[in-house]
C-alpha cells in the first residue's frame, strides 16, 4: 500500500499556490495496516471547509519548511 501511495505522489508534480494564496503543507500518516489518519476541521461560521475531513497540516509561515508546517 505504501509503495502505491509513493508511486502516485511521484507521478503528480507539486504545485505552488495561485497568486495571492499562502502555501500549505500536509502530512499523510499511514499505519502498518495502510490506514490513513484524517482530521475533521473545526466548525466555524463563514469557513467554506468547516467540518470537512482533511489531512493534518497548515499554512507555511515565513522561514518554515513544508514539513514543519505539516507537523507543527
Image (spheres, rainbow, N blue to C red):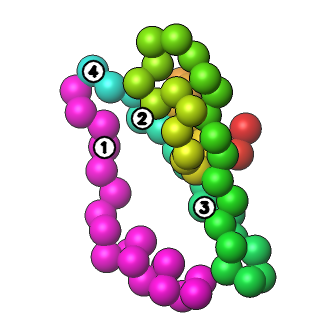
Q: How crowded is mark 2: few (under 14 residues within 10 Å), some or many (20 or more)?
A: some
Return the disc, 2 or 3, that comes first in the chain's sequence: 2
For discs 2 and 3, the disc positioned in front in the rendered view: 3
Q: In this view, does 64 lie above or below 16?
A: above
As drawn, is 30 to the left or to the right of 26? right
Callout 2–callout 1 Cβ contact below 8 Å: yes
Residue 10 locus on image (x, y percent):
38, 75
- Name, please, the residue furthest toward the right: 32
User: Magenta includes 15?
Assistant: yes
Tell which of 38 and 61 is nearer to you.
38
Q: What element carries label 4?
A: loop
Q: Can you tell which quarter of the image residue 40 is in?
A: top right
Q: Is mark 2 on a helix, strand or loop?
A: loop
Which residue is denoted by mark 2 in the rendering?
23
Residue 28's tag is 3
Callout 4–callout 2 Cβ contact below 8 Å: no
Q: Quadrant of the N terminus?
A: bottom right
Residue at screen point 74% across, 83% down: 33
Q: In which quarter of the image is the C terminus?
A: top right
Callout 3–callout 1 Cβ contact below 8 Å: no
Q: What element carries label 1?
A: loop
Q: Residues within 10 Å of mark 3 (few under 14, many from 20)?
A: few
Which residue is denoted by mark 1 in the rendering?
16
Which residue is denoted by mark 4 in the rendering?
20
Q: Is residue 60 visible?
A: no
Residue at screen point 69% across, 59% down: 37
Callout 3–callout 4 Cβ contact below 8 Å: no
Amino acid at each position: 500500500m505504501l509503495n502505491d501511495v509513493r508511486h502516485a505522489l511521484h507521478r503528480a508534480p507539486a504545485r505552488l499556490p495561485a497568486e495571492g494564496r499562502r502555501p500549505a503543507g500536509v502530512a499523510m500518516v499511514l499505519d502498518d495496516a495502510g490506514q490513513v489518519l484524517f482530521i475533521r476541521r473545526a466548525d466555524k461560521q463563514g469557513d467554506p471547509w468547516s467540518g470537512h475531513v482533511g489531512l493534518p497540516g497548515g499554512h507555511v509561515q515565513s522561514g518554515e519548511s513544508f514539513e514543519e508546517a505539516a507537523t507543527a
